Image (cartoon, grey):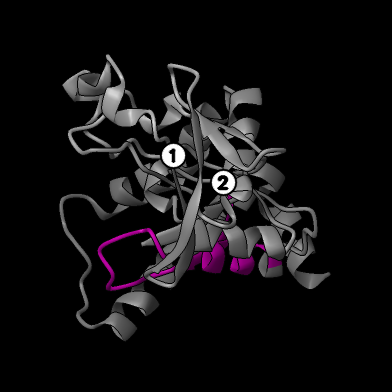
Amino acid sequence: MQTAIDSQHHLIVAHEVTNVGSDRRQLYRMAKEARNASGVSDLHVVADHGYFTGNEILACHEAGITTYLPKPQTSPNQAKGMFPREAFRYVPERNEYRCPARERLIWRFKNVEKGQTLPCYWSSACPDFLMKSQCTTGTYRRIKRWEHEEVLEAVTARLDQAPDIMRIRRQTVEHPFGTLKAWMGATHFLTKGLKNVSMEMSLHVLAYNMKRVMNLLGTTGLIQAVRA
């Protein structure tokens, strides 16, 4: 179940039922549906790390949608006591990286993996580095940088400048889900099949939004708004 929630009134402005078990390909589609439904041109979207996918974030960026979401930490290096990728600082004016030992990782070649263009960097000093065991088990510590990496870096920077925004996300998104689950009780969806479940969920969303608006405006206010 995918939902986009208005952070001010906690209304469900867009929703969709999918049979995909991952959120990694849902960010742009839900953001676009939320913008179309709300009419908000300068849309700011907050999501959790399960939605963090480069191509999805890039699509939002190109559509003028501002995103806030944490980058998942998937590398096991830090748990092993080795330098994580974040310890390597990119120097844009030189198109190179600096490692924790201040060595230069220069551009070597460009590769394409899963449709993404990835320039690759490493330093010739790696084999003789005294702390090499804390860096890599290979001959060189290679850093791959997506050609649109600056878009992902901007997302991280925005999140660092707004540390409380993920708390707002939890308060916003979990509220409707908690209410709907309470209404449904211990049962699951009563129908089967994607089309039928989508219709059933739409009825839940309609009921939730109507009750929410009645709480905000009152029954008379809702009727007046519908007539208008």
Nearer the observer, 96 or 219: 96
Q: Position of residue 56 (x, y in %)?
A: 52, 62
Q: Position of residue 58 (x, y in %)?
A: 60, 60
- The residue under the point 53% across, 34% down is 97
Q: Which residue in the structure is indicated by mark 2?
A: 152
Q: Which mark is residue 71?
A: 1
- The residue under the point 64% across, 43% down is 9
The kind of residue tagged 1 is Lys
State whether residue 206 appears in this view.
no
**Magenta segment includes 22:** yes
Distance from Cα at disc 1 to Cα at disc 2:
9 Å
Nearer the observer, 214 or 109: 109
N-terminal of the pair, mark 1 or mark 2, is 1
Q: Residues within 10 Å of mark 2 (few under 14, many from 20)?
A: many
* Lateral position of residue 65 relative to residue 184, left or right: right
The reply to whether the C-beta atoms of the residues labelled 1 and 2 are less than 8 Å apart is yes
* Lateral position of residue 108 relative to residue 157, left or right: left
For the residue labelled by badge 1, is the local secondary structure a helix, a strand or a loop? loop
Q: Residues within 10 Å of mark 1 (few under 14, many from 20)?
A: some
For the residue labelled by badge 2, is the local secondary structure a helix, a strand or a loop? helix
Q: Tell me if residue 41 comes above or below residue 71 in the rendering.
A: below
**Magenta segment includes 143:** no
Q: Position of residue 6 (x, y in %)?
A: 62, 48
